[in-house]
Image (cartoon, rainbow, N blue to C red):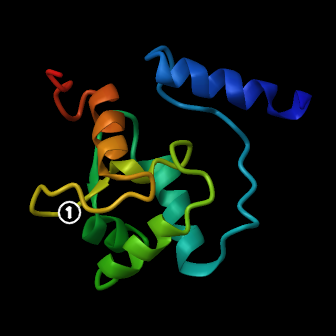
């Protein structure tokens, strides 16, 4: 539909390495409470090419004990990539989880320059 034309164009530019943010007006109605707070902080406060730990993201929204709950919020993200849950990692350097699979998470982080591009 015409309504999706611009978001699709911006996603294509992102995947081509030509765009670092989406600049879209997001409808947050599919989230509420803590999950909404986490996802909004993630969308606005973790820019392209950076990562944040689950615990740090929890602390940013006032719940420093909520690292596991941040993981649940990532799992309920209705707009992955646009709300970049792939940028949330474990404090010990591990990737953590990702609904699209860890290889997809690795590729997204490599696209953003956080991880090296795979050799093969």
Query: For the view shown, which residue lies furthest in the left direction?
Result: 92
Question: In the image, is 24 to the left or to the right of 76?
Answer: right
Quadrant assignment, res 94:
bottom left
Judge by depth and name the residue closer to the eye, 32 or 79: 79
Judge by depth and name the residue closer to the eye, 45 or 32: 32
Q: Position of residue 29 (x, y in %)?
A: 76, 66
Mark 1 lies on a secondary structure that is loop
In the image, residue 83 sits, relative to residue 16, either above or below, namely below
Question: In the image, is 78 to the left or to the right of 66?
Answer: right
x 29%, y 40%: residue:
50
In the image, residue 28 sits, relative to residue 24, either above or below, namely below
Q: Position of residue 67 (x, y in %)?
A: 31, 77
x 55%, y 59%: residue:
40
Quadrant assignment, res 9:
top right
Marker count (numbered) = 1
Judge by depth and name the residue closer to the eye, 100 or 38: 100
Query: For the view shown, which residue lies furthest in the bottom direction?
Result: 65
x 72%, y 67%: residue:
30
x 48%, y 23%: residue:
15
Location of the N terminus by quadrant is top right
In the image, residue 101 sits, relative to residue 6, either above or below, namely below
Q: Position of residue 43 (x, y in %)?
A: 51, 50
Quadrant assignment, res 12:
top right
Query: For the view shown, which residue lies furthest in the right direction?
Result: 2
Judge by depth and name the residue closer to the eye, 96 or 113: 96
Crowd around label 1: few <14 · some 14–19 · many ≥20 (10 Å) = some
Residue that label 1 marks: 90
Question: In the image, is 90 to the left or to the right of 66?
Answer: left
Q: Position of residue 78 (x, y in %)?
A: 62, 59
């Amino acid at each position: 539909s015409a309504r999706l034309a611009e978001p699709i164009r911006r996603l294509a530019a992102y995947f081509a390495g030509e765009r670092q943010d989406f600049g879209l007006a997001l409808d947050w109605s599919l989230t509420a409470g803590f999950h909404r707070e986490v996802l909004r902080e993630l969308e606005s406060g973790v820019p392209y090419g950076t990562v944040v730990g689950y615990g740090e993201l929890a602390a940013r929204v006032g719940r420093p004990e909520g690292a596991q709950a941040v993981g649940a919020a990532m799992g309920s993200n209705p707009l992955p990539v646009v709300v970049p849950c792939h940028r949330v990692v474990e404090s010990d350097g591990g990737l953590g989880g990702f609904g699209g699979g860890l290889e997809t998470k690795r590729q997204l982080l490599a696209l953003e320059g956080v991880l090296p591009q795979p050799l093969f």
